[in-house]
Amino acid sequence: MAVRVLVPGRQIDTGVVRRAGRATYERLLGGGVRVFEYQPTLLDATCVIVDGVWSSVGSANFDNRSFQLNDEAVLTAQDRSLAGHLTEAFEHDLAESRDITPDEWSSRPLHERAREAAARLLRREL
């Protein structure tokens, strides 16, 4: 099973949110998940595609705040055609993204690690 995750890169509206998200990379990478950071501009949609059949796209993030506090809109469908179109868009976005490798991640500077650890403490509030 291949799992790839595309997340915002440096172009994001809240830096602390990015650092809190990056605090999860080690666990993801350790589990075999490939993590990509989108480079050109802000990335602000949530899309999930499973086995080329099931898709979910919308404004909700997969966190407690989106599910319990915010008003969000999500379309979920079991449709190969829709999943195919979303997969094409995802592959296009991956081509404009940076692949975060486990080696690169483990060698990042100490100051980045410290900022991510501090942001992780705020995750429930973000």
Image (cartoon, grey):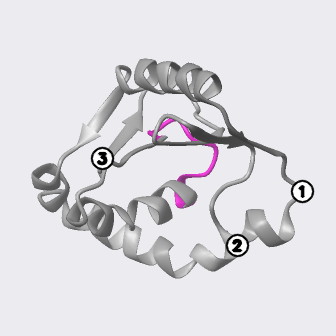
Badge 2 or badge 3: first in the primary sequence: 3
Q: Report the predominant secondary structure element of the magenta stretch.
A: loop
Q: Dividing the picture into quarters, in which one does residue 82 lie? A: top right
Q: Which residue is mark 1?
A: 71
Mark earlier in primary sequence (3, 1) = 3
**Is disc 3 surrounded by few (<14), some (14 to 19) or many (20+) residues within 10 Å?**
few
The picture places residue 97, in percent across and down from the top left corner, at 36, 29
Asked if labels 3 and 2 touch by Cβ distance under 8 angstroms, the answer is no
Q: Residue at x 33, y 47 (%)?
A: 35
Callout 1 amino acid: Asp
Question: Which residue: 49% across, 34% down?
Answer: 52
- Residue that mark 3 sits on: 2
Kind of residue at disc 2? Asn
- Magenta includes 13? yes
Q: Residue furthest right?
A: 71
Q: Which residues are magenta?
A: 8-16
Q: Position of residue 114 (x, y in %)?
A: 32, 72
The residue wearing badge 2 is 64
Label 1: few (<14), some (14–19) or many (≥20) C-alpha neighbours in 10 Å: few
Q: Amino acid at mark 3?
A: Ala
Note whether 92 is above or below 68 in the view shown. above
Residue at 32%, 62% in the rendered image: 28
Can you say whether 48 is above or below 90 in the image?
A: below
Distance, label 2 to label 3, CA atoms, is 25 Å
Is the residue 112 above or below the residue 103 in the image?
below
